[in-house]
Image (tube, rainbow, N blue to C red):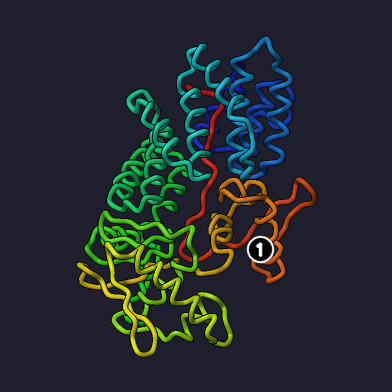
Amino acid sequence: MDSLITAAARALALGDPLGALKRIALREDPPALALRGTAMAQLGDLVRARALLRRAARAYGPREPWSRARCVVAEAEIALASRDLHWSSKSLDAARVVLEEHGDRVNAAHARYVEIRRLLLIGRLEEAEHLLGLRNLRTLPPPLKAVHELIIAGIAVRRVQATRARRAFTRAARAAREADIPALTAEVEAASLVLTAPAARLIARGAGRELRLKEVEALLRSRTLIVDACRFVVREAAAVIELATRPVLFTLARLLAEAWPGDVPREHLVARAFRGKHVDETYRARLRVEVGRLRSVLRPLAEVVATRQGFAMSPRRAPKIIVLARLVEDKHAAVLALLADGESWSSSALALALGTSARTVQRALESLAAAGRVQALGLGRARRWVTPPLPGFTTTLLLPAPLQSD
């Protein structure tokens, strides 16, 4: 390897893409193409970066499997950053095996982390945690240690484990300082803001206030009876009653919880649960049936009683009832939450992350676009959707992924 390639690789490893490009910007040989692709990725031009890496992989050919495997790993990370989540994990795994066979354990570990981050992004926490547990931190350089801790923090945040997340962010910040890569340090700092930003809303006795992640964690561990509108469950400590597939029952439970210790008039219950404009005997009969079902479902945790005006709910053991709601309660809140990371998403990637159909997501995007809340970029299969970051959400940066390991 010549001195310019070595210097460019070292500059990329330190998070200096401009310094790397100064040395290899005009070169067309495979190592230079690969390094230029990585540099363009760090600068944010992901389309150009993927094109350069593909050219490098073709130029290396089957006779240089190690170098070609590194290009595959770099392209997979760029696909992750551009929210192209439908790439084949088999090709990435094959590249990881090649890297391990050639003794390149650092880049092999990096390939594994790219796959883990993809699993985390689409909500497959158990698989991500399983793969994460296979890594040996002692053999990793500081940048990958930071990535490892960021993934731990991401899993902890999604599981509302604020204490575990804070410790992981602290370790990630320490590793980022040791790596001395400004982009990595900035990512850790940005991601850790989730600990101080509002995470949910608490509604009790008709009033609401915002909660941070630590407060949500403490609330979920308390003896309070919680109607959780984030996960559509009713819970008290370890006891959880799932109502995600029974939206009418959950709506009734939330209305009664918001009114506790008072009651809710029948007219209001009918209007919110059934969207009925006029309460007639048909709606009254339907309400009695659904309230009876709710009473049966909630019997271990709460009692639902009839009052003169309507119905009321009271806890059996808990000292109080509260509602835990999302910060943004919108019909398309889940789509907006994913777009709030500041990256450009395709409708198919959003559907994969949300576990729903692409057509459902497309309808949601069209509705949001008509309201001016999201914007489409590109046409056809290249179309991506973006929105400005919402207050209280952090933005994910592209982690530096040097192709060369010192």
Instruction: For residue 183, say whether it is visible.
Output: no
The residue positioned 44% from the left and 53% from the top of the image is 190
Residue at 65% in and 27% down: 34
Q: Where 80 falls versus 337 (above or below)?
A: above
Q: Position of residue 66 (x, y in %)?
A: 59, 15
**Image x and y of residue 186, in percent:** 46, 49
Q: Is residue 311 visible?
A: yes
- Residue reaching furthest bottom? 308
Question: With respect to residue 252, does 87 lie above or below?
Answer: above
- Give the amino acid at mark 1: Val
Residue situated in front as seen by the camera: 283 or 359? 283
Location of mark 1 (residue): 374
Badge 1 marks a residue whose secondary structure is loop
Q: Which residue lies at the image location 61% right of the left edge and 45% below the top edge?
A: 83
> Which sits in the foreground, 322 or 378?
322
Horizontal placement of 29 versus 289: left or right? right
What x and y, as percent, mark residue 266?
Answer: 44, 84
Q: Nearer the viewer, residue 373 or 124?
A: 124
- Which one is nearer the viewer's eye here, 118 or 123? 123
What is the tally of numbered marks visible in this picture? 1
Q: Quadrant of the N terminus?
A: top right
Query: Would you identify the image quadrant in which residue 222 lies?
Result: bottom left
Badge 1: residue crowd in 10 Å (few <14, some 14–19, many ≥20): some
Q: Report which quarter residue 40 is drawn in.
A: top right
